[in-house]
Image (cartoon, grey):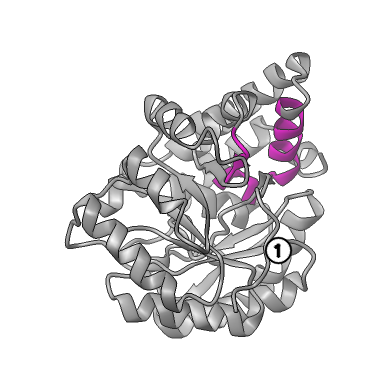
C-alpha cells in the first residue's frame, strides 16, 4: 500500500547536502542544524541522497543512517523525499523500503547509470520497479551524470504508471522544460520541478511547481521568497531576489577549477556559516585554506547574515 501524497507538490525543496565527519561517519549535529536551518527558512520539503547529497559516493550504511535520522529530525513537519538511484534494481528497491520503514513520504529515481538504456527499456524498468515500490516516486532527469535523458514522450508515458507522481529536471535545458510542460499539459496533478536555480522563477511563472535548489541549503528564506514572488507574479520583488541568486551562482559555485566546485563551494559555505562540516566523500576533498578564505569573503559580500534571517 503506497503512502498517500498530496499532488502536485509545490515550493522549494532543498536537495540537502550530506554532512560528513569522514567517509564513514555522518556529522549528526551538523545534520540536525542543517534541517532546522532549512525548515525555519520556510522550505516546503527536504530531499536527501540526490546529486548534491553525494549519494553515489556514500556507503549503503551511511545512506540508511541518513534516511533514518532525517526522517526523525524532520518529524513530519515537511515531506521527506529520498533518492534511491542505483545501478542495481534491487538496491534501489532496498533503499525505497528503508525509506518507507522510517517514514519518508516519497522517493526519487534517476535512470540506472553506467549502462545507458533506451527509452522503451527505461519505461519497462519503471513499470517493473513500481510493482514493488512502497512509496510514491518522482523521476529524476540528470543526463550529465546518467548519460540518459527522459525524453518528453517518455515522461508523458511514465506519468500514467501508477505511483509515479512527478519529475525533477536538472538538465538546465529551457527548450526541454517547455517540451515536457507541453507533454504534461493535461496532467495538472503531476509535479514538475527544476534543479536550476538560475531560472527557477521563470519556470514557476510559466506554470512550473517549484525548485529543488542547492542554494536553499544556505539561504532557504531567499529561495522561498523568490518562489512566492514568482507565484504571485510580483515582478518588483522578483528582480532583486533573482539578482541575489545570480550573485550566489556566479561566485560561491565558481571558486575552484573542477566540476566538483559547486558542491565544494556549497559545503564550504555551510561550514563557514557554522552549520555543518564540509568534509567531502571520496574521490573529492574539501576546499583548502585559500579557497575557504575566498568563500568567506564572498559570503561577506553577500551580507550572508542578513540573508540567513530572510
Count the marks. Answer: 1
How far across and down, in percent of the image, does residue 285 sit? 38, 61
**Quarter in which the C terminus is drawn:** top right
Seen in the picture, residue 112 relative to 92 is either above or below; the reply is above
> In the displayed structure, does residue 185 sit left or right of residue 55?
right
Residue 290 seen in the current view = no
Residue 115 seen in the current view = yes
> In the displayed structure, does residue 123 sit left or right of residue 164?
left
Q: Nearer the viewer, residue 191 or 110?
A: 191
On the image, numbered disc 1 is attached to which residue? 35
How far across and down, in percent of the image, does residue 235 sit? 73, 15
Span highlighted in magenta in the image: 208-230
Crowd band around label 1 with a 10 angstrom C-alpha radius: few (<14), some (14–19), many (20+):
some
How far across and down, in percent of the image, does residue 211 sit? 59, 41
Q: Nearer the viewer, residue 133 or 170?
A: 133
Seen in the picture, residue 71 relative to 260 is either above or below; the reply is below
The answer to which quarter of the image holds residue 177 is top left
How far across and down, in percent of the image, does residue 27 sit? 59, 74
Q: Nearer the viewer, residue 255 or 247?
A: 247
Q: Residue sitting at 49 percent across and 76 percent down?
A: 96
Is the stretch drawn in magenta largely helix, strand or loop? helix
Q: Residue sitting at 73 percent across and 29 percent down?
A: 231
Seen in the picture, residue 59 relative to 44 is either above or below; the reply is below
Q: Nearer the viewer, residue 204 or 31?
A: 204
> Element under label 1?
helix
In magenta stretch: residue 88: no
Q: Residue sitting at 67 percent across and 36 percent down?
A: 300
Q: Residue sitting at 45 percent across and 59 percent down?
A: 161
**Quarter in which the N terminus is drawn:** bottom right
Amino acid at each position: 500500500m503506497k503512502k498517500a501524497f498530496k499532488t502536485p507538490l509545490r515550493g522549494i525543496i532543498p536537495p540537502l547536502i550530506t554532512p560528513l565527519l569522514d567517509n564513514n561517519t555522518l556529522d549528526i549535529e551538523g545534520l540536525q542544524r542543517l534541517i532546522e536551518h532549512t525548515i525555519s527558512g520556510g522550505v516546503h520539503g527536504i530531499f536527501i541522497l540526490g546529486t548534491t547529497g553525494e549519494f553515489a559516493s556514500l556507503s549503503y550504511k551511511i545512506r540508511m543512517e541518513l534516511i533514518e535520522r532525517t526522517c526523525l529530525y524532520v518529524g513530519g513537519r515537511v515531506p521527506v523525499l529520498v533518492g534511491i538511484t542505483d545501478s542495481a534494481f534491487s538496491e534501489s528497491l532496498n533503499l525505497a523500503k528503508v525509506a518507507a520503514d522510517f517514514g519518508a513520504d516519497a522517493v526519487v529515481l534517476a535512470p540506472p547509470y553506467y549502462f545507458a538504456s533506451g527509452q522503451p527499456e527505461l519505461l519497462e524498468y519503471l513499470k517493473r520497479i513500481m510493482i514493488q515500490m512502497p512509496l510514491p516516486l518522482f523521476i529524476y532527469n540528470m543526463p550529465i551524470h546518467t548519460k540518459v535523458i527522459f525524453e518528453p514522450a517518455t515522461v508523458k508515458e511514465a506519468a500514467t504508471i501508477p505511483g509515479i507522481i512527478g519529475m525533477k529536471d536538472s538538465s538546465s535545458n529551457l527548450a526541454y522544460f517547455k517540451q515536457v510542460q507541453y507533454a504534461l499539459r493535461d496532467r495538472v496533478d503531476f509535479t514538475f520541478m527544476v534543479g536550476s536555480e538560475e531560472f527557477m522563477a521563470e519556470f514557476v511563472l510559466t506554470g512550473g511547481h517549484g525548485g529543488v535548489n542547492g542554494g536553499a541549503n544556505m539561504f532557504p528564506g531567499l529561495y522561498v521568497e523568490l518562489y512566492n514572488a514568482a507565484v504571485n507574479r510580483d515582478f518588483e520583488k522578483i528582480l532583486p531576489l533573482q539578482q541575489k541568486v545570480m550573485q550566489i551562482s556566479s561566485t560561491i559555485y565558481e571558486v575552484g577549477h573542477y566540476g566538483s566546485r559547486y558542491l565544494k563551494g556549497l559545503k564550504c559555505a555551510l561550514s563557514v556559516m557554522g552549520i555543518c562540516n564540509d568534509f567531502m566523500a571520496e574521490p573529492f576533498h574539501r576546499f583548502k585554506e585559500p579557497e575557504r578564505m575566498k568563500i568567506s569573503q564572498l559570503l561577506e559580500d553577500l551580507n550572508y547574515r542578513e540573508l540567513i534571517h530572510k
